Image (tube, helix red, strand yellow):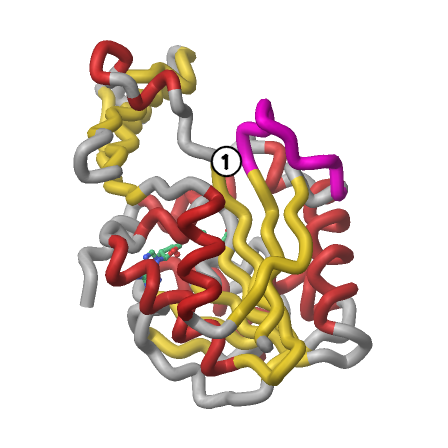
Amino acid sequence: MPEDFFGEPVAASYDDDTDVRFGERHLALESAFLAGLAGDRGRALELAIGTGRVALPLAARGVEVRGIDLSEAMVSQLRAKPGGADLPVTIGDFSTADAGARDLDLVYLVFNTIGNVASQDAQVATFANAARHLRTGGCFVVETGVPGVLAAQHDHRYRVFHHADEHHGIDEYDPVTQLMWSHHYTRTDDGTYRRNSVPFRYAWPAELDLMARLAGMRLRERWAWWDRSPFTAASPSHVSVWEKE
Ligand SMILES: C[S@@+](CC[C@H](N)C(=O)[O-])C[C@H]1O[C@@H](n2cnc3c(N)ncnc32)[C@H](O)[C@@H]1O
């Protein structure tokens, strides 16, 4: 099993994040996008279901959602929420774990979490694992950042992405291995800072398309965001939909 970077205390405060993606309006947008692909009463699998941030609003739209996650602590948070105990969750590595279902309409992996599997082999395996749970014509959706090209140059190895008293965030890039360490320094109640450093493997959209092709899927849509805004050379993120052939 890969290392768990989402144990306590990360899980306990995960949903306190002020990122736009935790807001009700955003979750309505994201769950509508996903429900549209799953179809009415569709069947879906979330790779890295976590605390159910997306799975619960999607289930509230009538989609049958199940999940895979390796963190017991994150899944306990999900279980404690209304309706959270009803979603089947497999504890395991989403690049290989079997969620016990086939011919699903939708598999999705959001919030940059494809990067949490920190090698190319494991990412290729993740696409294959998504494909084996899907029916022909079913879709795999990934939401992730586009690697910061400038930040990946050797003289811009560190990028400050957040700077406030309660939290400092610094991304550290290694363009040779395509590894990016995200260092979070979060202020605790006694005024000291707790450091949490999480490795990601960053990959450009074209590499993800190739992984999808290896898994028997083809790109169907690529947007900059969940509102279907156009993906351009300046987009910092993408929401990509591959269809199983
Ligand atoms: C940023 S959270 C995202 C949770 C949820 N998908 C969301 O959007 O709020 C990342 C989640 O991925 C899980 N995770 C990371 N690597 C994993 C792996 N290889 N297999 C299963 N779960 C993994 C973590 O335990 C954590 O719950």
- Magenta stretch, residue numbers: 228-237
The secondary structure that dominates the magenta segment is loop
> Where does the image place residue 78, in percent across and percent down from the top left?
49, 63
152 above or below 65?
Answer: above
Please give left or right for residue 185 compared with residue 49 in the image.
left
- Going by the picture, which residue comes out furthest to the right? 40
Tell me if residue 137 comes above or below residue 109 in the rendering.
Answer: below
The image quarter in which residue 184 lies = top left
Mark 1 lies within 8 Å of ligand 1 (Cβ measured): no
Q: Quadrant of the C terminus?
A: bottom right
Left or right: where 82 falls relative to 8:
right
User: The residue under label 1 is which amino acid type?
Assistant: Asp
Residue toward you, 73 or 37: 37
Query: Pointer 1: what residue?
Result: 17
In the image shown, does 113 or 91 lie closer to the viewer?
A: 113
User: Would you say residue 90 sits in the magenta stretch?
Assistant: no
Q: Residue at x 60, y 40 (%)?
A: 21
Q: Can residue 187 be seen here?
A: no
Quarter of the image that includes the N terminus: bottom left
In terms of image quadrants, where is residue 76?
bottom left
Looking at the rendered structure, the secondary structure element under dot 1 is loop
Query: 10 or 96, which is in the foreground?
Result: 96
Residue beneath the point at 75% across and 41% down: 227
Q: Is residue 184 left or right of residue 77?
A: left
